[in-house]
Image (cartoon, helix red, strand yellow):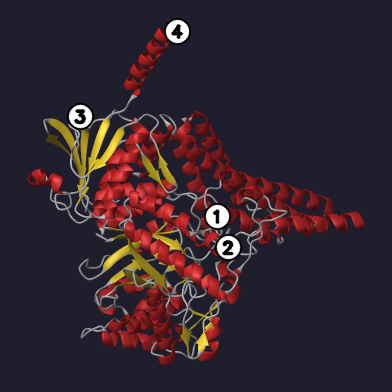
Amino acid sequence: MTRRFLWLAILLLGSHLDLLAGPKVEIVTNVVSPSLEHTAAEELAGHLRRLYQAEVSLAGTPSDPGAHVIFVGSPSSNPETRDWSASWPKLSDQGHCLKTVNFRGQPALLVGGETPAATFWAVSELAHRLGIRSLLYGDLDPATPPAFKLTGYDVVREPQLRSRAWRTIDDFPIGQESWGLQEQKQVVKQLAKQKYNRLLLSVHSWQPFVDFEFGGVKKQTGVLWYGLQYPVGANTAGRSAFAGAKLFENPDFTGRKTYQERIEAGTALLQGIIKYAHEMGMTVGLVMSPLEFPKEFFTTMPQAKLLRGENELSIGPGPLQMADDEVLMQIAKTQLRAYLGTYPEVDAVYLSLPKKLEWSEHAESSWNSLSQRSGPDGLPSLLQFTDSARHRLQIGVRKTGDLAFRSHLVGFDFLTRLRSDSNLFLRPDGQPLEVNFLQIDPDLFACLDKLTPTPKGQLRFVDYTARQVAQNENERPAVAADLISDRLILILTDDNTGFLPQASHKSLERMIAQSREKRWAGYCTDFLSVGDFDLSSYFLSRASFDPDITSDQACHDMVSTICGDGIAVPVIKALRLIEEATTLIAENDVEFSSPIPNIVMKHYEPKKVVPAWWGQVRDHYQNAMNEMYRANTRARVGGRSYVLYHARRAEFGWEYMNSLESLAKAGIARQEKNAEEQQAQLQAAVNSMYNALNALAVVARSNSDRGIIALLNEYGYRRLTKELEAVEREFESR
């Protein structure tokens, strides 16, 4: 090639690159504004570079007359926006806006809110309008980005529900207890983009998150998921998900063998979560039970009793202890001080009761005490409330609520006594800490304003599944908003349905609408496994600000934007099938797949027939899988990861149900002494369990997914294999 032609080629290439170059954009923030506003500006810069190949610069003042200008902040935080103070909308502390203004004769954009968090949400709102969908595990870009422009924006967003909380940690390997700090921070950032504004750390006394001493006894128990072990070495189905590890662990606890090492890892984890949540503009609440203690403290409180649960690691009040028991109160205060001393940065504390509290013996005494403390009018008779509770059937627990009400009543008496010590609930600066009550019995709602000291707040738990909560609207009577800050616990996934694919979008839609009508302060999510609710969290994030959006509209918006036109229809159909499967399980067996050691092998017990509803659940999962795979083949490349994940989750559910059906048939064959059929069905059960775990391993994207695989290897695949081998040996010996 001659030099003349080489120069011509260079000129043509340069001209072509100029045509491909994106817009020049200047993002203006105050150099001394809060760090979260700078984080917002950097997020926006990344979006524009990715979507439009934009040439983006961040500056404290506009300097390039040829650039499009976006101002991030508000007149109170960014001096460069003060020329538009008169036209700046009146916003609450959570309000945020996108507004086109004239700057140097050209359109510019104001993106901000009255607080740093609200400014971050404003940037997230702009990203949403550019087609970016922020899901729990990252951002997905639109199939076709809209044209870049700064004109036409006049958007103001104010929350319909001001308190939007997300719960983390809790107590099972298939949940967020298995997440290290890196994964926790990843999801916290996405939650901030979805405009959640509070993180709840739900902890238990036997976990390695606090250390204290009482009565000469030092705390010694500090384990995760009840101290159970889940090996994932040889003979592990879906082993590819574990990158060669031999034991499933929270990565921040790897190699931490002693109690002290685990305490150091645990406190570092929670302190890191709190710090990062604050950096992302979220407040943090600590959820703990003051009536639950590690069992080594039995010697200091011999009247206590073991609390029912996995491995029986905790003790609680016994039948001889009343709500005013002095030793019980002192150990509770000691433990609470240890938590608040270890995590002084928390913004709120939520006082809960043990899950299986049995403390009904002193209900009359506690009722009389509460009545005396409630004011001159007192309370109605206890008989009136126990009669109501006796006739109330909580579908989720399949029993009347009389004993539960009486136990919760005594527990509530204790919590109010504990709460009355105002010096206990102080921040390091001496200001009072926000205190909330969790899981108050529904029959106490009507007189709660008389029972609780100020300031008052509570989270209401009604039942175990979203569908049941939505149906039991009458269990949530309204109370005066100026007296009680009410928040509803929204069940995203049912603990008892466990790790199986679940959906509850229609029920969540009803609950959100009911909460708005009753003028509740907001909600907190509740779930066990995390895999299924990209759409749930997205819908809640939009419905919290938009009262008109439905779950179907949210799905259409999310899926069509990231996957392309026509994909939302099969996805919605698949999700409805999964929601129908969820309902069938909840209606027929509330402990069907609760993640406990006998979860699989209990179905090997003698049955006359395989329950017909099992086949319905299996078929729903299979049909949902087919719809998701159909959507996956048509989705654009960037959005396939979302659809493929849920296709594999449905495949996992289908194969799991196949395994259980074969196992039940093997149990029937064993009962009928048909060894050949028993062996064949056990082999089918092993094969289907293997296929289920491998289907999930292909798309495992969190330690919750890996926790499901590890747990079902220990309680399912290996136990099935062992039983099959035993039957084969017996068959061959005949």
Residue nearest the viewer, comparing 639 with 43? 43
Residue 372 x, y percent position in the rendering:
27, 88
Q: Which mark is residue 499?
A: 1
**Mark 1 to mark 4 CA distance (whole Å):** 68 Å
Closer to the N terminus: mark 4 or mark 2?
Answer: 4
Does residue 162 show up? yes
Residue occupied by mark 4:
2
In front of the other: label 1 or label 4? Answer: 4
Residue occupied by mark 2:
254
**Residue furthest right in the image:** 734
**Regarding mark 2 in the picture, which secondary structure is present there?**
loop
Q: Which mark is residue 24?
A: none
- The disc labelled 2 sits on which kind of residue? Thr
- The disc labelled 1 sits on which kind of residue? Phe
**Regarding mark 3 in the picture, which secondary structure is present there?**
loop
**Mark 1 to mark 3 CA distance (whole Å):** 54 Å
Up the image or down, 710 lies above or below 202; here it is above
Query: Residue at horizontal 38%, vertical 87%?
Result: 364
Residue nearest the viewer, comparing 499 with 175? 175
Closer to the N terminus: mark 1 or mark 2?
Answer: 2
Query: Residue at horizontal 48%, vertical 63%?
Result: 396
Q: How many neighbours does mark 1 have within 10 angstroms: few (below 14), some (14-19), or many (20 or more)? A: many
Up the image or down, 506 lies above or below 132; here it is below
Q: Which mark is residue 66?
A: 3
Is disc 3 in contact with disc 4, using a CB cutoff of under 8 Å?
no
Q: On the image, which quarter does residue 526 sit in? A: bottom left
Is disc 1 in contact with disc 3, using a CB cutoff of under 8 Å?
no
